[in-house]
Amino acid sequence: MADLHDPLPLASGQVLRNRLMKSALSEGLGDTSQGPDHRLVELYRRWGTGGFGLVVTGNVMVDRSHLGEPGNVVIEDDRHLDGLSRWAKATKDGGGLIWMQVNHPGRQANPLATASQPVAPSAIKMNVPGWQAPRELTDDEIENIIDRYATTASIADAAGFDGVQIHGAHGYLVAQFLSPRTNRRTDRWGGDPEHRMRFVLEVVRRARAAVSPGFSVAIKLNSADFQRGGFTEEESRAVIAALASEEVDLIEISGGTYESPAMEGRPLVTSASTQAREAYFLEYARTAREAAGDVPIAVTGGFRTEAAMSDAIRSGDCDVVGLGRPTTVNPESADSLLTARKDKLTVPDASLPLPGWLASTGRAKSFLSALELQWHNTQLHRLGAGTDPDPTIGPWITALRLLKNNGVDAFRRRRSS
């Protein structure tokens, strides 16, 4: 029976020193040339000394013409190799592994950061006010994007990162190809589930071919996108089985899209047992076990107590526990839990006390979601500046910063990685 302290060997030959992972959070700390800012290096130095077996970066973009949000790091070539190497080394000096999350936003390209028209498998606009309709990708463009993933992976390898995590969740481009709701193509990239999964399988294969032996290639995948006519749990398990045949090193389970409430890290409905066990996607992970075969499964979202994390590992429901937002105020989370200095991670409530009639409106929900992300982003930026988190920062100060930085766009949903 496994334990949080136990190492985990991967297909690549790498070994996680324990079962705790700092999961991806979008940092917004790229510099003006879209390379890693010195604050990003300092932030990951802090997380690197936090005791995690694995640290996964926020989403690094493969194309500077299509960004997920302002401040994204972009890797198209080796122009930022020195800065990337400092980023990797700062994390690895703490003793754990670091994987770079690589991504293309597709139709979710942020209008605050991208002048180009978004691209997608099909020209289906997001159901979010103010976002531009995408145009449908050509076959040649799809091939080019797949090669971009491989290029980014090869540069991450050269810079000293230990692996890459392909972002296949949260409604980004990989997820758009997988979902029949956003992929209406009738060529080799669309149609039945086998054709819709061709894109992600090619991304994994070419990334693997571009890197050295011993470099990990992993994936973050939706359990479902929680939308009518969208990507289902049954289809997700089929994709997991196909990815397992490609010998990916780890599958992280998440859920939702930018248009659905699960994008906040919570599915629409969870059973009482799931709520009691804290982890939002643990029930699905249990059903995905058979499809995954020998590939380890990570679950992120909702974990707060050492007891729940240990139970998830000991029961075999997952192999790795991912921690996201708790690490913004507890950068040493893993070490605190593993040494029993803490048995629970606390995350302050950053919400505004709005009246019920207002809080239930779509605009208010979007604003409150953005407010929560802004609060955690503020903590990340404090860590990057070399100062400690400040859990006492209030929601009103955060709201003013959000409005100052985004104006009316503060009322659009934002997302984590």
Image (cartoon, rainbow, N blue to C red):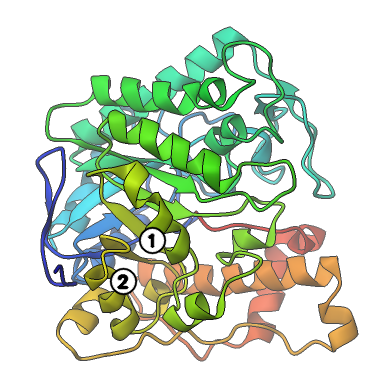
Q: Residue at x 22, y 26 (%)?
A: 211
* Residue extending farthest top: 140
Residue 16 placement (x, y as % from top left): 15, 56
Residue 312 placement (x, y as % from top left): 31, 71
Task: Name the residue that disc number 2 marks.
Answer: 312
Query: Which three-letter amino acid code belongs to the residue tagged 1?
Result: Val
Name the disc covering residue 299, or none.
1
Q: Relative to 292, is 49 on the left or the right?
A: left
**Closer to the camera in the image, 301 or 36:** 301
Task: Tell me the quarter of the picture where residue 245 sits.
Answer: top left
Q: Residue at x 28, y 77 (%)?
A: 311
Q: Relative to 151, is 87 on the left or the right?
A: left
- How many marks the image carries: the answer is 2
In this orientation, does residue 179 appear?
yes
Q: Relative to 53, is 108 on the left or the right?
A: right
Instruction: Classify mark 1: helix, strand or loop.
Output: strand
Q: Residues within 10 Å of mark 2 (few under 14, many from 20)?
A: many
